[in-house]
Amino acid sequence: MIQFPNAKINLGLQLVEKRPDGFHNLVSCFYPVQWTDALEILPAQGESTFTLSGLPVPGEPKANLCWKAYQLLQKDFGLPPIQMHLHKVIPMGAGLGGGSSDAAFTLKILNELFKLNLSSEQLENYARPLGSDCAFFVQNKPVLAVEKGDVFEPISVDLTGWYILLVYPNLAISTAEAYAGVSPRFPENSLKTLLAQEITAWKDTVVNDFEASLFPKYPLLQEIKKQLYGMGAVYASMSGSGSTMYGLFKTPPVPPLPFPKEYSVWQGVL
Ligand SMILES: C[C@](O)(CO)[C@H](O)COP(=O)(O)OP(=O)(O)OC[C@H]1O[C@@H](n2ccc(N)nc2=O)[C@H](O)[C@@H]1O
Ligand SMILES: Nc1ncnc2c1ncn2[C@@H]1O[C@H](COP(=O)(O)OP(=O)(O)OP(=O)(O)O)[C@@H](O)[C@H]1O
């Protein structure tokens, strides 16, 4: 069975407070975007195998979140051997949640392939320890994420028909480094209320709190945001803990795009 784990963007990200366990409580709207990897899992004979192609993923294959996800279900359900292949396309250290998505899709494919009949809630419980973003990709629909970003509330944000441009400037920012640089604060306004406004009002009100600490350190991020607005974006922001910047457009951005060749750029319609 082959599926296509997708990326996510964050519409606003409020960093509320540091928790006693060292993590941070946040409020953010997670929104799926169809920039995808490809993940194939087949039943196999003998030893289970895991292979990779596409962008080089740092670390041993056995440290990959896909393999860890397989191990979790293997331990509880004694799964038969598999051959698993991941073709990596979504940039890493990009704030797009690609690794978490791969892990969540591994759980979902195994659930289907071996008829484990796990509910979404059960799959989310397997996903949570694999990464804070992982549980989101089980249901993979727009939500308001709270606490560590792994508890969800419904939100009615619908960007269907909007064009999106994602710009990854080839700069990997570690999530832990990004969190270490922030000063959390209780939000003045509810993100849910801010996102209920017309999108034209988001520019001055819907904020990703990581920008304040990462823009001074990496000025090119602010530059990309300016370029996106210059190209006609109605709203532009950083995704997650960076470094991907995105813009939302009413009509498709017109080439040539003003970004160097080394950047990874993805364009689509939501
Ligand atoms: C920035 C976001 O992408 C928002 O969508 C996520 O919060 C990041 O989630 P993730 O990449 O799945 O992160 P994890 O692998 O769970 O955590 C990496 C590191 O980030 C920090 N971390 C992560 C999530 C969180 N709510 N508070 C934190 O302080 C911790 O130091 C943690 O060790
Ligand atoms: N399947 C995987 N794909 C990508 N990275 C993986 C995977 N498994 C483990 N990793 C490790 O996780 C790190 C972060 O990858 P990921 O794609 O989740 O980053 P990210 O987009 O910054 O995540 P987030 O949006 O959650 O901050 C990689 O540098 C790699 O070491």
Image (cartoon, rainbow, N blue to C red):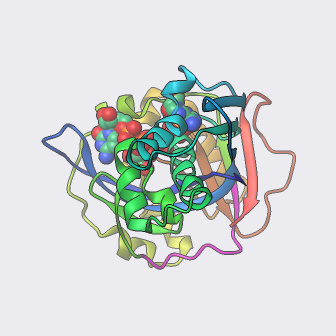
Q: Residue furthest front?
A: 46
146 shown above or below 181 = below
**Magenta stretch: helix, strand or loop mostly:** loop
Q: Residue 40: percent from the left, percent from the top?
A: 70, 45
Instruction: From the viewer's perspective, tell me whether residue 14 is left or right of residue 112.
Output: left
Q: Which residues are magenta?
A: 155-165
The quadrant of the rendered image in which ligand 1 is seen is top left
Q: Residue 106: percent from the left, percent from the top?
A: 56, 48
Using the rendered image of the protein, determine whether residue 179 is visible from the camera's viewpoint.
no
- Residue at the spot x=45%, y=50% of the render? 134
Using the rendered image of the protein, determine whether residue 115 is visible from the camera's viewpoint.
yes
Magenta highlight on residue 158: yes
- Residue at the spot x=55%, y=72% of the render? 199
230 shown above or below 84 = below
Using the image as rendered, state which of residue 27 and residue 83 is in the foreground: 83
Using the image as rendered, state which of residue 143 and residue 203 is in the foreground: 143
Q: Residue 215: percent from the left, percent from the top?
A: 46, 36
Magenta highlight on residue 238: no
- Residue at the spot x=60%, y=32% of the render? 48
Q: Quadrant of residue 270?
A: bottom right
Q: Quadrant of residue 251?
A: bottom right
Using the image as rendered, state which of residue 203 and residue 30 is in the foreground: 30
- Residue at the spot x=75%, y=27% of the render? 262
Q: Residue 186: percent from the left, percent from the top?
A: 20, 57
